[in-house]
Image (cartoon, coloured by chain):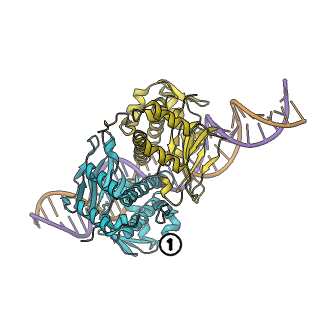
Chain colours: A cyan, B yellow, C orange, D purple
Amino acid sequence: MVNRFVAKLRGFAELSDEECKALARVTSEPRAYRPRQDLIREGDQPGPVFVILDGWAFRYKVLPSGSRQIMAFLMPGDACDLHIGMLATMDHSIQTATSAQVATISRQAMDEIMDAYPKIARAMYIAQLVDESTLRAWIVSLGRRSSAERAAHLLLELHIRAVRTGVADQDGMELPLSQAVLADALGMSPVHINRVLQELRQSQAIALRRGVLRIQNAAALTQFSGFDEGYLHRRLRKPE
Amino acid sequence: MVNRFVAKLRGFAELSDEECKALARVTSEPRAYRPRQDLIREGDQPGPVFVILDGWAFRYKVLPSGSRQIMAFLMPGDACDLHIGMLATMDHSIQTATSAQVATISRQAMDEIMDAYPKIARAMYIAQLVDESTLRAWIVSLGRRSSAERAAHLLLELHIRAVRTGVADQDGMELPLSQAVLADALGMSPVHINRVLQELRQSQAIALRRGVLRIQNAAALTQFSGFDEGYLHRRLRKPE
DNA sequence: CGGCTCCTTGACTTTCCTCAACATCAGTGG
DNA sequence: CCACTGATGTTGAGGAAAGTCAAGGAGCCG
């Protein structure tokens, strides 16, 4: 199987064969997780860097009222918590949404690799910056977009990210997220996301059924949701 | 005047006199900004690191519809864009909310300092992690808290951050933000934030008038808004 | 076939937005 | 000192968006 982590980082920096091999080596022994398993919980002491090689996960927090907010999706190729080891405790939890293959890289091994291969360090920093930028984009969505715009925006984001990592084609992707999960990411009720998705389907913009998303009218979705992919930083600055 | 930037970083790592002086030196020539001036705009090529020494600023994005979402507040001591120079363009803008003193540190000078003083590098990383954690906390607020809870949560956050940097005491702080600005940060209309603030005032939890916030009942606010200061990471992990 | 999860629908309620008017305040220049 | 101005804060009324509650349907698996 292609190593999605390597594939993603190659999109951020030109990596030599040796660098790719080094990355592949430290992620060569992933552990299998089942759906709905926590990788780490809020309050835990941060451990190794997690790398999702296959499957989906998400960062989330549960409020005292019991409601849940998802703050980020992790798809194949995504890593998390590059530097979070500096902090005493996790401020959120991470859970699988599907069964998943997850590699872990110890803090020490990560430091060694980044010291030995500056280009890898650079790619990891960029990945971190893009993640942060994505958080800001979500804030904009949650604060100022209608529920339908928000949903369309998220689907476009996930699709572009999936294409970038090579787990989707231009027309569509596998999207194994329940409506309840989407609702918790979009800050709405399960009932409402259901109605919103029906609208989007009826407008012939998307088809989403049984874990498969088809983007039928990307232009309309982009226009409607005010999607500007700048925040995903597909074009990068040249290293000086 | 005390250098708030140094004060803040000292909260993240034990800095020697020499390190403090180095930081003070590179921020010794701030430039004065008037209210509502952009420091940098979405689409611009990222430049130096900005350091707010006095006054308030915020990160924001404007949607095609013209509505604005604020994604972060920058108060005295806060810096921005440690590594963003790696990216080709800014994905958001930064604007002053008040008149402000802002120092700039060139990318090169920043790299030199971080190479020469690992503790400074560490403190800057931690600051970045806390900023990122704050973004996630805002996502939770916008997604899953009622407007009143959200407002209370934000006021508590700003107060704690202000106390940490030494620009506030336990009871209150200067908060020179208009209701319109608060509305754009909280994802609500100006009319609604006005009503929410009235509620909070009537419940004797806060007093907020003419740029001065008093926290009258922190316990009630904390409970009501589900505020858990963990995300601000006041307790840090020991360096190994 | 039962049992589970996930999706769908309808009815009703709450929250929040929009529009519009008016009040208050600080600063400016006559 | 006062009139004017622009920004900011306040109030009311009506409507749109989204939540809650409750019930039922569809697909999947042992």
- A217 vs A180: above or below: below
* Left or right position of A96 against B152: left
In the rendering, at what x and y percent does residue B20 appear? Answer: 48, 33
Comparing D17 with B11, the one in front is B11
Residue at 38% x, 70% y is A163
Residue type marked 1: Ala
Q: Is residue B80 visible?
A: yes
Residue A174 placement: quadrant: bottom left
In the rendering, at what x and y percent does residue C5 appear? Answer: 23, 58
**Secondary structure under the numbered disc 1 in the rendered image:** helix
Residue D10 placement: quadrant: top right
* Left or right position of C23 against D24: right
Comparing D23 with A98, the one in front is A98
Mark 1 Cα-neighbour bin, 10 Å: few <14, some 14–19, many ≥20 = few
Quarter of the picture holding the N terminus of chain A: bottom left
- A239 vs A171: above or below: above
Residue at 26% x, 41% y is A45
* Left or right position of B180 against A10: right
For disc 1, the marked residue is: A219
In the rendering, at what x and y percent does residue B33 appear? Answer: 65, 41
Comparing A82 with A179, the one in front is A82
Chain containing mark 1? A
In the rendering, at what x and y percent does residue A142 appear? Answer: 46, 52
* Left or right position of A207 against A226: left
- A152 vs A219: above or below: above
Q: Is residue A175 visible?
A: no
- Please tell me how many numbered marks the rendered image carries: 1
